[in-house]
Image (cartoon, rainbow, N blue to C red):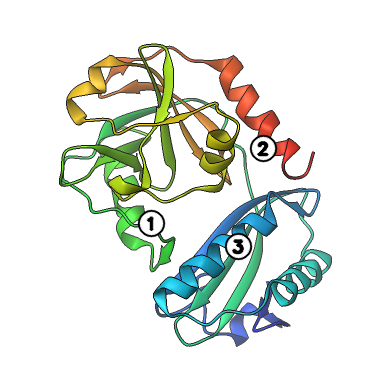
């Protein structure tokens, strides 16, 4: 598999990364859906990476260099429907990979993760702690999980942001609850489709409909929480996806 490493096209076996496209060590990353070799909201993702890098003391390239690397990667590794991951480690190295992606075909049944989780406003790797939450949910016969912070508020999914309809209003937790400022989340807030509001765990029973949102899944309907059925808001899910396309590849 060809990748971009520090601005140059190379085989993945020749760079310090796993075969699944993760850089060794620690750092920050962005995961982005691509359609026809065009990335959803690439500029927003790069801008978020620059903000995180500045706050964490990580050196990353200028936007133009990253964008040019992505163009070269798409030419070398085209995908009809893909996942672009760009990662930056704390040694000033960066990696971009472009892999096939399969759409989520069904709504998900989720649980509340049984232990409090301290979230992070930066998208950091290694990502093993988040993937473990997902894996544990699946071992318990759920598709995914939502996490609760030590203060008792809902944060997000294992690898996604979370939005919920409560009393007829769509809400999502604020970053003060240690929530990643996701790009799709940002777009929904900007367009007044979702309000910022902490969701205490004891209000889960008041959630009538919910979605996981991310730059990869866009909108993924949640059919139940801890086996309690929810209403599937197909129209709102389509509205989210359409808005994502408006800001990105559409």
Q: Position of residue 228 (x, y in %)?
A: 28, 16
Q: Position of residue 98 (x, y in %)?
A: 67, 62
Q: Which residue is mark 2?
A: 244
Q: Position of residue 178 (x, y in %)?
A: 31, 51
Q: Nearer the viewer, mark 3 or mark 2?
A: 3
- Disc 3/disc 1 C-alpha distance (Å): 14 Å
Q: Residues within 10 Å of mark 3 (few under 14, many from 20)?
A: few
* Quarter that holds the C terminus: top right
Q: Check disc 3 and report its element: helix, strand or loop.
A: helix
Mark with earlier residue (3, 1): 3
- Disc 3/disc 2 C-alpha distance (Å): 17 Å
Q: Position of residue 150 (x, y in %)?
A: 15, 47
Mark with earlier residue (3, 2): 3
Residue 52 position (above or below residue 137): below
Residue 28 position (above or below residue 144): below
Most extreme residue toward the right is 75
Mark with earlier residue (2, 1): 1
Q: Mark on residue 43?
A: none
Q: Check disc 2 and report its element: helix, strand or loop.
A: helix
Q: Residues within 10 Å of mark 2 (few under 14, many from 20)?
A: many
- Whether residues under marks 3 and 1 lie with C-beta atoms below 8 angstroms apart, the answer is no
Question: To which quarter of the image does residue 114 belong?
Answer: top left
Q: Residue at x 81, y 49 (%)?
A: 36
Q: Nearer the viewer, residue 227 or 230?
A: 230
Q: Check disc 1 and report its element: helix, strand or loop.
A: loop
Residue 93 position (above or below residue 219): below
- Whether residues under marks 3 and 2 lie with C-beta atoms below 8 angstroms apart, the answer is no
Q: Mark on residue 47?
A: 3
- Disc 2/disc 1 C-alpha distance (Å): 21 Å
In this rendering, would 152 be left or right of 142?
left
In this rendering, would 25 be left or right of 33?
left
Q: Which residue is mark 1?
A: 121
């Amino acid at each position: 598999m060809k990748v971009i490493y520090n601005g140059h096209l190379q085989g993945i076996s020749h760079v310090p990364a796993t075969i699944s496209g993760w850089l060794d060590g620690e750092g920050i990353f962005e995961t982005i859906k691509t359609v026809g070799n065009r990335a959803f909201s690439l500029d927003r993702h790069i801008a978020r990476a620059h903000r995180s890098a500045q706050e964490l003391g990580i050196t990353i390239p200028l936007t133009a260099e990253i964008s040019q690397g992505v163009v070269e990667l798409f030419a070398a590794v085209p995908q009809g429907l893909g996942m672009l991951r760009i990662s930056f480690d704390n040694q000033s190295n960066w990696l971009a990979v472009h892999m096939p992606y399969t759409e989520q075909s069904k709504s998900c049944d989720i649980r509340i993760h049984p232990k409090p989780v301290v979230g992070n406003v930066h998208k950091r790797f290694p990502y093993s702690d988040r993937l473990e939450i997902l894996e544990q949910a699946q071992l318990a016969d759920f598709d995914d999980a939502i996490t609760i912070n030590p203060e008792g508020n809902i944060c997000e999914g294992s690898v996604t942001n979370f939005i919920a309809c409560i009393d007829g209003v769509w809400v999502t937790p604020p970053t003060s609850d240690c929530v990643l400022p996701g790009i799709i989340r940002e777009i929904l807030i900007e367009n007044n489709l979702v309000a910022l509001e902490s969701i205490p765990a004891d209000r889960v029973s008041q959630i009538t409909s919910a979605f996981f949102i991310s730059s990869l899944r866009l909108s993924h309907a949640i059919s139940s929480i801890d086996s309690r059925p929810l209403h599937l808001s197909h129209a709102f899910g389509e509205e989210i996806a359409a808005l994502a396309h408006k800001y990105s590849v559409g």
